[in-house]
């Protein structure tokens, strides 16, 4: 059970750091060769390989977010010795300037992940942010 709690804490930290704009904290739990993928419904919008590239994507100065707010929901983790996979349900509300226009959106996502146990503890090896529903807020 402690392994599952450690992995769930990684997902909670990832979301909290994203909300706070803490890119260092947001990327600290990825492996050096991690893969981060963004999917909207069935379309892959982005795929970044490597912890340094993931950091740069999260730290993009072109992303003009006024706020981001994550609510993590159920988290199901399947342990396989020193590897694991799982899904964390997430609701993200954000506001950003897109094409010069202020946009506010609520999105529902499933974070499909693969994890690996390292000497430093559990790390994210692959994270697919699958946004299954988006609702603009006016």
Image (tube, rainbow, N blue to C red):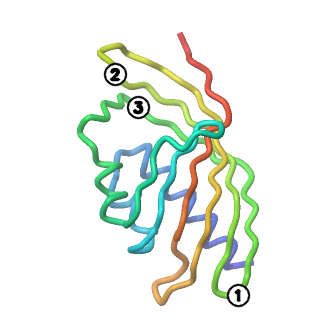
Which residue is most to the left? 61
Q: Nearer the viewer, residue 89 or 126?
A: 126
Whole-percent x, y for residue 78 in the image:
76, 72
Which residue is most to the top? 138
User: In the drawing, does residue 66 fall left or right of residue 15?
Assistant: left
> Mark 1 or mark 2: which comes first in sequence?
1
Which of the numbered marks, if any, corresponds to residue 2? none
Q: CA distance from mark 3 to mark 2?
A: 11 Å
User: In the drawing, does residue 35 fall left or right of residue 64?
Assistant: right
| Quarter of the image where the N terminus is located | bottom right
Q: Nearer the viewer, mark 3 or mark 2?
A: 2
| Image: 71 above or below 123 | above
Whole-percent x, y for residue 59 in the image:
29, 48
Circles 3 and 1: CB atoms closer than 8 Å: no
Which of the numbered marks, if any, corresponds to residue 97? 2
> Mark 3 or mark 2: which comes first in sequence?
3
| Image: 63 above or below 113 | above
Residue designated by label 3: 67
| Image: 93 above or below 77 | above
Whole-percent x, y for residue 80 in the image:
73, 82
Q: Nearer the viewer, residue 66 or 128?
A: 128
Q: Nearer the viewer, residue 2 or 42?
A: 42
> Mark 3 or mark 1: which comes first in sequence?
3
């Amino acid at each position: 059970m402690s392994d599952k709690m450690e992995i769930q804490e990684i997902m909670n930290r990832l979301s909290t750091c994203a909300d706070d704009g803490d890119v260092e904290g947001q990327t600290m739990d990825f492996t050096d060769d991690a893969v981060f993928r963004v999917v909207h419904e069935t379309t892959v919008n982005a795929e970044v390989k490597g912890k340094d590239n993931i950091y740069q994507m999260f730290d993009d100065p072109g992303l003009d977010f006024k706020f981001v707010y994550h609510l993590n929901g159920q988290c199901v983790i399947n342990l396989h010795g020193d590897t694991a996979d799982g899904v964390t349900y997430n609701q993200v509300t954000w506001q950003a300037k897109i094409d010069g226009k202020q946009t506010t959106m609520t999105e529902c996502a499933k974070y499909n992940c693969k994890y690996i146990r390292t000497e430093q503890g559990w790390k994210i090896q692959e994270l697919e942010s699958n946004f299954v529903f988006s609702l603009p807020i006016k």
